[in-house]
Image: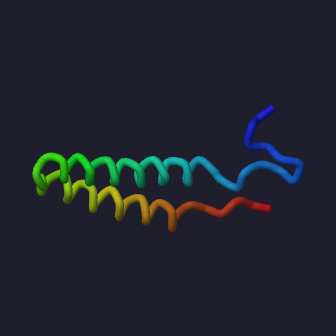
């Protein structure tokens, strides 16, 4: 039995939302590494780009059919 399954059904997420969340976490990883490396502009720009990509992916993700 899946740990995310309840009496009412399953958790409301799909694979598109999962990938968008992974990209969102990667953006914060790039930002923290960029700040750790004395403000590496390339990593901070990469963080901004991946954050924008994750927002776009979340907006594009289809809601679950009920």
Q: In the image as oriented, which residue stretches furthest toward the top?
A: 1
State the residue in front, 24 or 59. 24
In the image, 27: left or right of 17?
left
Colouring used for the render = rainbow
Task: Tell me what residue is drawn at x 87 percent, y 53 percent.
Answer: 8
Task: Tell me what residue is drawn at x 79 percent, y 43 percent.
Answer: 5
Q: Residue 39, percent across and down?
A: 12, 55
State the residue in front, 9 or 57. 9
Q: Residue 63, percent across and down?
A: 66, 63
Q: Give the quadrant of the N terminus.
A: top right
Q: In the image as oriented, which residue stretches furthest toward the right?
A: 7
In the image, 55: left or right of 33?
right
In the image, 43: left or right of 21?
left
Q: In the image as oriented, which residue stretches furthest toward the bottom?
A: 59
State the residue in front, 39 or 1. 39
Q: Residue 21, percent across and down?
A: 49, 52
Task: Tell me what residue is drawn at x 32 percent, y 47 percent.
Answer: 29
Q: Residue 2, percent across and down?
A: 76, 35
Quadrant in the rendering for residue 4: top right
As displayed, is residue 59 above or below residue 35? below
Q: Give the quadrant of the C terminus.
A: bottom right
Number of labelled discs? 0
């Amino acid at each position: 039995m899946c740990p995310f399954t309840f009496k009412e059904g399953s958790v409301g997420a799909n694979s598109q939302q999962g990938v968008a969340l992974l990209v969102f976490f990667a953006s914060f990883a790039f930002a923290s590494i960029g700040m750790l490396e004395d403000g590496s502009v390339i990593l901070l720009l990469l963080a901004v780009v991946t954050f924008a990509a994750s927002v776009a992916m979340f907006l594009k993700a289809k809601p679950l059919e009920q």
